Image (cartoon, rainbow, N blue to C red):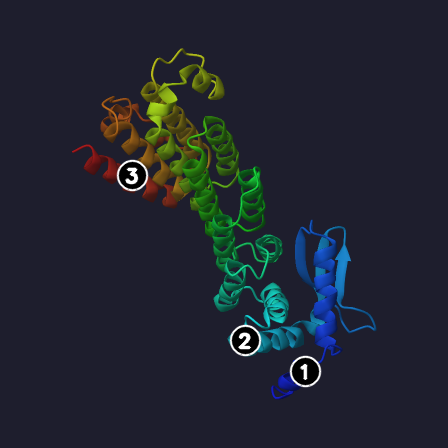
């Protein structure tokens, strides 16, 4: 059903119009079920004589036939009420919520909700649910993730907030390949945890294990490998704290060699990573991100420490198994040649 834009002003204060009824139905579902997990637009061939809001097993949907009309109604009214936001905050919250569910890429509406939360006119918990539902449909929505980070800095954090955010990142990265925004959010969550609670070796080890599994199944996902690099950098930056708890560190990391210092433990990690990287390069052809990660490992092992464990392999190609990769094609040969040139420059 198409409406003339001039009709929106007439509808703005009609609590019984179709759009208002749909908004009220959605509001009732979100209030009734705070454990909603997913939101989506449901394709239907025609409108039926019932509410287009669908609620099944913690999943929320809206039938496609009303999306355009409801969105335009909410969008128009959100901007009309903005100058009167202190007086009309209840209606403004309703309209911005519905509009963002249908089109979450409007930063102005997210900022409107920030203003309401900052002035204690809206509970921030509502927006945790809203952003989660938005991200279930659009896993790369940077505006929703940015709003979520702002919320985490404004409200009193639940003791399980780190676990909750990391679980969300798991779902987002699984739903969309090469989801840079999800991995960036994961880095931010880890960094905030570090800032608020200090370095937690158990959390680090858990994230490192998750990263190991992910990267083995997503060899070309640069974001996943970059997160692994990020974790190794944080391990290096906290060697002093790890040194004070070496027994725990060896147990958590499964090191049975009796490593004496945290620096040696870090070098062992890099050495294991280099061997895993070599095995992946030999087993799977032409994944450029593996070569970039390899260069990081070589730099980390030689620049940050005096040991020449990696530089010997760099300077003597005959000792490096990288040159015997199976099923080498033209692309892999190009990567090999680029890597040789990098090694030559690096070893000068």
Which residue is the site of mark 2?
A: 84
In the rendered structure, the answer to whether residue 291 lies left or right of residue 308 reads right
Using the rendered view, name the quadrant where residue 69 is placed.
bottom right
Q: Nearer the viewer, mark 1 or mark 2?
A: 2
Which callout, 2 or 3, points at the residue further toward the start of the chain?
Answer: 2
Q: Which of 212 and 244 is in front in this view?
A: 244
Which residue is the site of mark 1?
A: 11
Q: Nearer the viewer, residue 62 or 245?
A: 245
Question: For the N terminus, which image quadrant?
Answer: bottom right
In the rendered structure, the answer to whether residue 231 lies left or right of residue 56 reads left
Per the image, label 3 sits on a secondary structure element best described as helix
Q: Position of residue 320 (x, y in %)?
A: 31, 26
Q: Where is residue 27 in the image (x, y as percent from the top left)?
A: 70, 63
Using the rendered view, name the quadrant where residue 72 is placed.
bottom right
Q: How far apart are marks 2 and 3 (CA)?
A: 61 Å
Which residue is the site of mark 3?
A: 339
Image: 97 above or below 249: below
């Amino acid at each position: 059903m198409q409406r003339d834009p001039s009709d929106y002003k007439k509808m703005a204060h009609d609590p019984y119009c179709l759009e208002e009824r749909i908004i009220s139905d959605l509001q009732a579902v979100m209030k009734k079920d705070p454990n909603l997990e997913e939101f989506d637009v449901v394709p239907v061939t025609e409108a039926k004589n019932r509410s287009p809001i669908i609620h099944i097993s913690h999943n929320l949907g809206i039938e496609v036939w009303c999306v355009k009309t409801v969105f335009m109604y909410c969008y128009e009214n959100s901007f009309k009420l903005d100058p009167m936001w202190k007086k009309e905050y209840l209606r403004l919250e309703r309209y911005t919520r519905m509009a963002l569910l249908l089109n979450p890429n409007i930063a102005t509406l997210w900022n409107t909700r920030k203003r309401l939360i900052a002035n204690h006119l809206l509970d921030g918990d509502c927006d945790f649910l809203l952003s989660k539902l938005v991200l279930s449909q659009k896993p790369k929505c940077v505006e929703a993730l940015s709003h979520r980070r702002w919320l985490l800095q404004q409200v009193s954090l639940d003791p399980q907030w780190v676990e909750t955010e990391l679980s969300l990142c798991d779902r987002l990265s699984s739903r969309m390949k090469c989801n840079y925004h999800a991995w960036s959010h994961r880095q931010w969550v880890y960094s905030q945890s570090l800032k608020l609670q200090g370095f937690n070796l158990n959390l680090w080890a858990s994230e490192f294990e998750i990263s190991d599994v992910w990267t083995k199944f997503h060899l070309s996902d640069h974001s996943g490998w970059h997160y692994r690099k990020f974790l190794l950098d944080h391990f290096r930056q906290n060697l002093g704290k790890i040194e004070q708890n070496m027994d725990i560190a060896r147990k958590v990391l499964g090191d049975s060699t009796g490593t004496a210092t945290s620096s040696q433990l870090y070098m062992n990690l890099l050495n294991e990573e280099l061997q895993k990287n070599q095995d992946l390069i030999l087993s799977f052809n032409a994944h450029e991100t593996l070569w970039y990660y390899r260069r990081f490992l070589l730099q980390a092992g030689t620049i940050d420490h005096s040991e020449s464990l990696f530089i010997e392999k760099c300077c003597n190609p005959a000792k490096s198994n990288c040159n015997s990769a199976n099923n080498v094609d033209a692309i892999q040969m190009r990567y090999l040649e680029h890597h040789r040139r990098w090694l030559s420059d690096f070893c000068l």
